[in-house]
Image: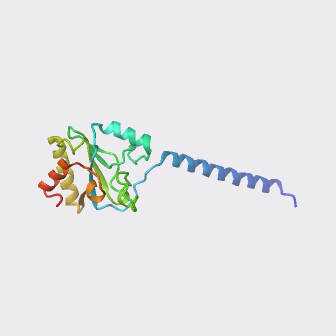
Amino acid sequence: MTKTFLENLIEKAKLQLLILQLQLRVIFLQRKLTIPNLPMPKILVLHHGAGAWGFAKVNKHHGDSWGFVSSLGFTLGYHKWIEFNGKLYIARRDNEEGAHLAVEGKPHWWNRNSVGLCLQGNLEIKKPTEWQLMTLKDELDSYVARGFEIEYHGNIEPTACPGKYLVEWLKQNKYIK
């Protein structure tokens, strides 16, 4: 049975639509866009950068490594970042998936159910600056007032993060036990 001109045209149009759909999927996968659509988490997890790199350099490094772009246009895996001078950067919305924990057996659970906050510096060998602590205190008080539980990376999986000096400060100020 011979196809009519109209049937051939419809078949070609369907194939063109399929090709367009596949091309769009490739574009979105390459950009790795993160959409803020998760339930609001109730856990704040603290980290340290473990070095002197600032927000811009870590954001670029995370972009080069993973490339997950937040709805705010950043690639930093943490939701928030506090520089040595106390400046707070917001890289992800609280209800966006982060990329700050890779816990064995639950690789995505923590990133989908917690907010990651990172302080610049290696807080295992040097204390956080007073400016960082002022900004951190404001952030922690805000999250606690909204019913968040405060955690730190090393309490979730074996690591020195976020450094002994920050853990000590968190205990002294009764944010953790």
> In which quarter of the view is residue 49 placed?
top left
- State the image coordinates of residue 6 (x, y, percent, origin top left): 79, 55
Residue at (33% x, 37% y) in the render: 56
Above or below, 65 against 38 in this view is: above
- State the image coordinates of residue 78 (x, y, percent, origin top left): 33, 48
Name the image colouring: rainbow
Residue at (36% x, 62% y) in the render: 39
Q: Which of 54 and 121 is in front in this view?
A: 121
- State the image coordinates of residue 11 (x, y, percent, origin top left): 74, 55
Q: Which of 22 and 77 is in front in this view?
A: 77
Task: Answer with left or right where residue 102 lies relative to residue 166.
Answer: right
**Residue located farthest toward the left when viewing the structure as drawn:** 172
Placement of the N terminus among the 4 image quadrants: bottom right
**Residue located farthest toward the right when viewing the structure as drawn:** 1
Task: Answer with left or right where residue 23 lies relative to residue 80.
Answer: right
Task: Answer with left or right where residue 132 lies relative to residue 40.
Answer: left
Q: How many labels does the image show?
A: 0
Residue at (23% x, 40% y) in the render: 87
Task: Answer with left or right where residue 35 lies relative to residue 48.
Answer: right
Residue at (83% x, 56% y) in the render: 4
Placement of the C terminus among the 4 image quadrants: bottom left
Q: Which of 99 and 95 is in front in this view?
A: 99
Q: Nearer the viewer, residue 44 or 22?
A: 44
- State the image coordinates of residue 25 (x, y, percent, origin top left): 56, 51
Above or below, 58 against 154 in this view is: above
